Image: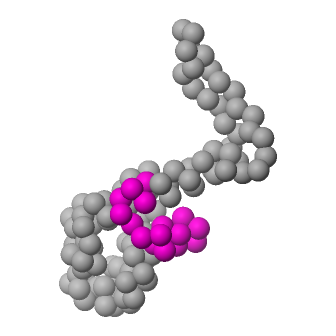
Amino acid sequence: MMNRSFKYQTIVHRGHPAFVLVPWEDWNHIKHILKLEKARASGIPQQVVEAHVNNNESLIKAWREYLGLTQKELAERMGMSQAAVAKFERPGARLRDSTIRKLAVAFKLEDRQLMAIKLMEE
């Protein structure tokens, strides 16, 4: 974590800690760490995780580049246009489960590795 002291406020309900108020900057740092951990737990390679989290690339683009594919090559594997690939490669793009399964086949990955996309976009 960061090398400065954190000042959180704990909210107690009925004698037990219920919530913690966290400064916005700290929360963004914590979210970054949580994203990394979710990705690692899903079996995503470190290079893909770093491209996604540190460079703000979509997981699809990070995977494609990690596997050495162009958008055109991925589109051909999926039976769609390069423009369609470019569209769902944008950060924040919402993907259907069926598209994620097609990506898993095209990338030769397990569904769980690409299903992490939905978890990480939340």
Residue 17 relative to residue 58: left or right: right
The residue under the point 33% across, 79% down is: 84
Eyeballing the image, is 98 above or below 72?
A: above
**What segment is highlighted magenta in the picture?**
38-55
The residue under the point 21% across, 75% down is: 105
Image location (x, y in percent) of residue 54: 59, 67
Residue 109 relative to residue 40: left or right: left
Q: Is residue 58 magenta?
A: no
The residue under the point 57% across, 20% down is: 17
Q: How many marks?
A: 0
Q: Nearer the viewer, residue 121 or 84?
A: 121
Q: Nearer the viewer, residue 82 or 49?
A: 49
Eyeballing the image, is 76 above or below 8?
A: below
The residue under the point 49% across, 74% down is: 47
Image location (x, y in percent) of residue 57: 51, 71
**Render colour scheme:** one colour
Residue 81 relative to residue 24: left or right: left
Magenta segment, prevailing SS (helix, strand or loop):
helix
Image quadrant where residue 120 sits: bottom left
Image location (x, y in percent) of residue 73: 31, 90
Q: Is residue 47 magenta?
A: yes
Image location (x, y in percent) of residue 60: 39, 73
Residue 51 relative to residue 9: left or right: left
